Image (cartoon, rainbow, N blue to C red):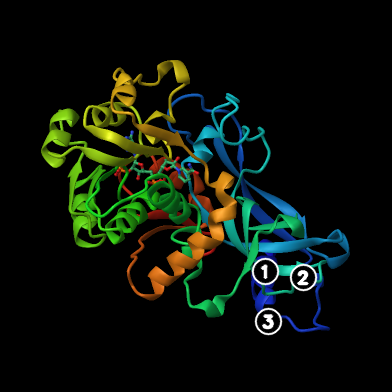
């Protein structure tokens, strides 16, 4: 066993068990693996040419940790499509700024406090942060931590990145806040078996809507109907004519379209919207790997006027004042067994580049998460 492995194992155990007076010397320095961006990827899926893993020494000695900081062992990292938009090298003023080259990448994550220089946190606390480094360990200011998680609440930790995290919140905002669903509303959801889509469909069903989803494989079509309660679903990769497909699935038109993919799907939807339809625009993942001049245009935007459609982009970060309402409702649904969740867990910090690439295929089902140390 190398000294690197020894120190990592000591820290991992120590975060849970080390008692006062035990020797700390063995764990004062760890080699922490972390991901950084070596080059921007203006087009295409980022690869190992852009995303690189390195190992850096990190001091966990208590006197090296500044006041009001905590040392964290990362447990789970959320893999979200917006991360890709921070790797293009083009600051378009949207979302977040570009990641800096050679700096560690950050993402939503869950970690365990292993050293604390803040009275509000003790060793063993499980904490959530929107901008944890994609790394095994880190030292961060304690005021960036969003909240502590109570493991006794009985919710599996990764679900705080899924049904009780950004995807669940984005789904709830899109359907319940912006979608204004009514019993019998005709609802269409794209990327329906993904992190946002699986919850959006279930929330719309709970409001009594008729819900149809699109996704990229037959297995996922089956899952939408059998596990997530969608009324119907189709594989967009098999539909040569999206317009015709929507005619078939929505003979009475679309009242709410939760937009996750953009491009050709949005254009097809606009030919089927009812008067006063709502289109909450959550994202447009089919367009993230192109520069804006290469992206698909939408030729029938005029339909938004004629059908008086309310099409509205939104970001979860702008609705934090609604998070408590969302969490209360979602927790209640979970306790009652009314919401199901699927996780696609990638093992090990090493899997970060693969997990980012996977967002642009149809290989995942549910919310994509890395378990830092499986
Ligand atoms: P996700 O669905 O878990 O993963 C992405 C999925 O998109 C893939 O599994 C794939 O599923 C589908 N996809 C990939 N490339 C595609 C393409 N070219 N055409 C059609 N579908 C494609 O991701 P998510 O976290 O739930 O995010 C869904 C959308 O919500 C994204 O646009 C994301 O940016 C957005 N989002 C926005 C906010 C916000 O605050 N506004 C928050 C979270 C997420 P298929 O099998 O269906 O192809």
Work out how far the residue at label 1 is from the one at label 3, CA to CA, in angstroms.
16 Å
Determine whether the residue tagged by mark 1 lies in a helix, strand or loop: helix
Write down which quadrant ligand 1 falls in: top left
First-in-chain label (1 vs 3): 1
Q: Is residue 317 above or below residue 168?
A: above
Residue found at x 74% / y 63%:
71
Mark linked to residue 17: 3
Reading the image, the residue beneath label 2 is: 120
Percent across and percent down for residue 155 are 47, 73
Q: Is residue 68 above or below residue 48?
A: below
Whether residue 160 is visible here, answered yes or no, is no
Mark 2 touches mark 1? (CB < 8 Å): no
Q: Is residue 177 above or below residue 313?
A: below
Reading the image, the residue beneath label 1 is: 6
The reply to whether the residue tagged 1 has its Cβ within 8 angstroms of ligand 1 is no
- Quarter of the image with the N terminus in it: bottom right
Crowding around mark 1 (Cα neighbors within 10 Å: few <14, some 14 to 19, many 20+) is: few
Determine whether the residue tagged by mark 2 lies in a helix, strand or loop: loop
First-in-chain label (3 vs 2): 3
Residue found at x 23% / y 60%:
229
First-in-chain label (2 vs 1): 1
Work out how far the residue at label 2 is from the one at label 1, CA to CA, in angstroms.
30 Å
Q: Is residue 127 left or right of residue 59?
A: left
Percent across and percent down for residue 143 are 75, 57
The reply to whether the residue tagged 2 has its Cβ within 8 angstroms of ligand 1 is no
Whether residue 28 is visible here, answered yes or no, is yes
Q: To which quarter of the image does residue 140 belong?
A: bottom right
């Amino acid at each position: 066993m190398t000294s690197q492995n020894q120190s990592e194992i000591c820290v991992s155990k120590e975060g849970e068990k080390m008692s006062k007076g035990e020797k700390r010397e063995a764990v004062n320095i760890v080699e922490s693996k972390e991901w950084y961006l070596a080059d921007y990827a203006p087009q295409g899926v980022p690869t190992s040419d852009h995303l690189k893993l390195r190992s850096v020494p990190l001091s966990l000695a208590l006197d090296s940790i500044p006041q009001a900081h905590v040392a964290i062992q990362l447990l789970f990292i959320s893999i979200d499509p917006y991360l890709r938009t921070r790797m293009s090298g083009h600051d378009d003023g949207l979302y977040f700024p570009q990641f800096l080259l050679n700096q560690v990448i950050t993402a939503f994550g869950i970690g365990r406090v292993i050293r604390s220089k803040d009275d509000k946190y003790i060793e063993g606390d499980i904490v959530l942060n929107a901008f944890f480094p994609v790394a095994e360990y880190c030292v961060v200011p304690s005021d960036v931590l969003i909240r502590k998680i109570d493991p006794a609440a009985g919710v599996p930790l990764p679900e705080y990145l899924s049904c009780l995290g950004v995807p669940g919140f984005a789904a709830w905002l899109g359907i319940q806040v912006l979608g204004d669903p009514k019993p019998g509303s005709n609802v269409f959801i794209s990327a329906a078996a993904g992190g946002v889509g699986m919850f959006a469909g279930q929330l719309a069903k709970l409001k009594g809507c008729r819900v149809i989803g699109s996704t990229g494989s037959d297995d996922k079509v089956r899952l939408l109907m059998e596990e997530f309660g969608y009324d119907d679903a189709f594989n967009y990769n098999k539909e040569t004519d999206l317009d015709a497909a929507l005619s078939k699935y929505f003979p009475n038109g679309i009242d709410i379209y939760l937009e996750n993919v953009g491009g050709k799907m949005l254009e097809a939807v606009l030919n089927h919207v009812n008067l006063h339809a709502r289109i909450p625009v959550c994202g447009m993942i089919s367009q993230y790997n192109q520069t804006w001049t290469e992206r698909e245009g939408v030729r029938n935007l005029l339909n938004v006027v004629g059908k008086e459609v309310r099409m509205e982009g939104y970001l979860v970060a702008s609705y934090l004042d609604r998070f408590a309402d969302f969490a209360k409702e979602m927790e209640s649904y979970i306790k009652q067994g009314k919401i199901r969740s699927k996780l696609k867990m990638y093992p090990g910090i090493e899997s970060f580049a693969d997990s980012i690439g996977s967002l642009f295929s149809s290989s995942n089902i549910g919310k994509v998460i890395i378990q830092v140390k499986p």
